[in-house]
Image (cartoon, rainbow, N blue to C red):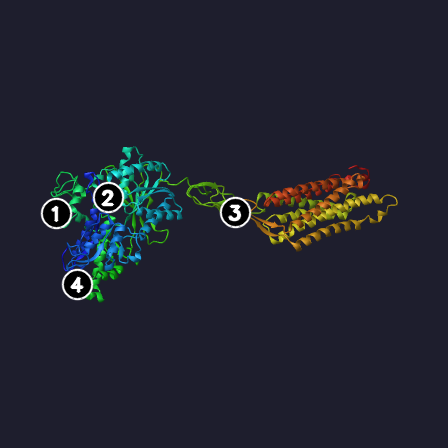
Amino acid sequence: MMQGAKALTIWYQKISQKLQTSYPKVCSKSVPKNYQQNLALAFAVKEINENPNLLPNTTLGFHILNSYYVPRMAYKATLSLLSTQWKFVPNFKCDTKNKLITIIGGLTADISVNIATAISIYKMPQLTYGIFSLEHGNKRLLPYLYQMVPNEASQYMGVVRLLQHFRWTWIGLLAMDDDNGDRFLETMVPLLTENGICFAFTIRFPKITYLQEAIDLLLEQGDAFTVHNRTKANVYFVYAIPAFVFSLRMLIFLAPFVSLPPIHKVWILTCQWDFASFSFEKNWDIESFHGALSFTVHSNQPPGFQEFLQDISPTWTKGDGFIQNFWEQAFTCSLKNSHVLGDSKKPCTGNEKLESIPMILFEMSMMGHSYNVYNAVQAVAHALHSIHNSRSKYRRLAVGGNVQSWQIHHFLRSIVFNNSAGDTLSFQENGEMKTGFDVINWVTFNNGSFARVRVGRLDPWAPVGKELTLRDDHIVWHKTFTQGWPVSVCNENCYPGFNRKKKEGQKFCCYDCDPCSEGMISEQMDMDDCISCPQDQYSNKHQNQCIRKDISFLSFKEPLGIILTWLAIAFSLITSIVLGIFWKHRDTPIVKANNRSLTYILLLSLLLCFLCSLLFIGQPRRVTCLLRQTMFGVVFSVALSSVLAKTITVVLAFIATKPGSRLRKWVGKRLANSIVLLCVFIQVGLCSLWLSASPPFQDTDIHSLTGKIILECNEGSVAMFYSVLGYMGFLAMVSFTVAFLARKLPDSFNEAKFITFSMLVFCSVWVSFVPTYMSTKGKYMVAVEIFSILASSAGLLGCIFSPKCYIIVLRPGLNNREHMIRMKI
């Protein structure tokens, strides 16, 4: 107890554990590394007392009591603090110099709850430096409890973010088989499931009391470890309370002696974890933990702490009841007054240095829980300092020296201060210190030493999804993982282009990979469903990316469009030349034969047929969509009706020459013109009905061709479209039939043979057009129709007019009446 004008008495939990066993060499063993927490408390008090600017004329003191990890011992220790020194009479104190102001403790949640329950009636602040979870007690019933670390749940979410970062979805869970382990699994299993992570198995170590019992129970776990070691789960998440860590290290130590396979996994450990060993564990192999990742309480290094440790000796203070046990365990020697069983007979000199102790037993750098103890003392001191400086009603109390423990709460909740290590500290409204966790990568060496490599930070106060930051390139993995970071999945990932299909009877992390169907993609690994591309895009061949579709139409600039354009122009020029020849030789017998006016009409309609094919080339427009099919239908009907009129005229002319024929009066231009007008009128009527009821319009087709957006003219009414084509087919068939029947009439007055052949060509083209047109898509459908127009028109032009042009141009001597009567063409 430090004496002074005022005294701050701080209860603090020293970590120690006694194993009840029949093996005397293990009896009374402690964990030397946890002695640093005592020293951190002493260093903080010393630093405050030596600071003239903080609590002047005030001296802080402290008591450190041990609970031995036994919750009921916490009650006794707490009640002893509430009693007069050396008297166990709670709530009766006559020592006015040493006043209990705050309690700091404990390391485990159940100890903290028991302490809080005992002191709640006094409204005394309690600063717990270990992990605390609301599952251990309702925080509303513990209003005077302050946590130096965030809630345990935030650490669990950090583990989830870590697993998600490395895409580890198939892990093992390890915990003690007790209430703490049950709470751990009840919390973690739903959290993992919600975030798409499965556990392959759980391993529960039983709670042990005797060493021999521990060995027997751990050997029973050997078979389970052998089975689980062969699974695809390469990541083990451990609820690393000290008792479990001891059991786990013992199992790994015993593995070579009982032929268990080496356990080389990625260990993820909670912040209770540390290489905090009993002295007899210092030579145990720690290679299995090489590359392990753990969440540790954020720590920093207050200046002067290492120098403080270097001055520690067994005689540094007479009031330290723990140093003898620590010294003997750490240096494997015996002090003069040692009664610890199993210690070496080698005497301790007292000049041993802490820096010579293996790191497995003690570290010179301030560790996380020690840093929390240091900050807890600093927080209380700054709260008291605020009371001293306050001009409120508390100033009178402070000056009078009668500060009550319940008066600290207001100032403790609102303090914001910088400690000597440079960290800014403050409490949240819920009593949690606004701090986070460090992600530590443990690197072990062959000589038994290790290094803590800080590779990340967990900030529970960051936005959701950004709590964890990692530096992947700083992480060292176990040497068994030679290719990048380890993989821990139930099966291989489904790469982009595939989606997951659950395996029946297994957990959702186990699945098959099905390729995406046509038109759908998956852009990321392990997608549950493929997604459709937007309408203006299509999937690539690997089904992992959408590509913008190309605009497709029959252009004047592409080779196919250029060829068809030149063909249309060429045939138009040929038709014009033929028309010119016939106009120039209009008075010759061969031109006059078979109705000269019908010949001109036919040639003009063929010229327009060739030219109207150009309406089908180029980007569809509203006007071209309206005109191209109707103009083609009307112009072709003119051509076909002209051919039909010429054929009927020939037939009637021969019939009318018979004596007494009554058809003579029908022979002449009036009949031919009437036939043409009637046939064209019907087609014009059909086209007018089409345009008024359901006209063609601009349209886009995004489905017919993969990777193409087809710009086209939608025909509107398909029935009307085929009605127009059907009517032209009807005219062609009638012309073909009449011409075929008149093919044996005298040749000098007869074009029937040429018309028959031209109609045969025409019908062949358009009969083949229909199935071809329906089986093609996009610009090739348009090209088929253009080709059919050009081919059928060229057939009419060539079959009917090429023999006559041959005579007119090359054999003009035959172009007279006498020769035409005699020739047999």
Dot placed on the residue nearer the N-terminal end, 3 or 1 = 1
- Amino acid marked by disc 3: Lys
Left or right relative to 687: residue 499 = left
Mark 4 highlights which residue? 401
Left or right relative to 398: residue 774 = right
- Amino acid marked by disc 2: Ala
- Residue at the spot 59% in from the left edge and 43% down from the top edge: 560
Mark 2 highlights which residue? 276
- Using the image as rendered, state which of residue 187 and residue 500 is in the foreground: 187
Dot placed on the residue nearer the N-terminal end, 2 or 4 = 2
Dot placed on the residue nearer the N-terminal end, 1 or 4 = 1
- Amino acid marked by disc 1: Thr
- Image coordinates of residue 488 in percent, x first then y, are 37, 41
Q: Tell me, yes or no, if residue 94 can be seen here.
A: yes
For discs 2 and 3, the disc positioned in front in the rendered view: 2
Mark 1 highlights which residue? 315
Dot placed on the residue nearer the N-terminal end, 3 or 4 = 4
SS state under label 3: loop
For discs 3 and 1, the disc positioned in front in the rendered view: 1
Q: Is label 2 in contact with label 4 (beta carbons under 8 Å)?
A: no
Local crowd size for mark 1, using a 10 Å CA cut-off: few (<14), some (14–19), many (≥20): few
Image disc number at residue 549: 3
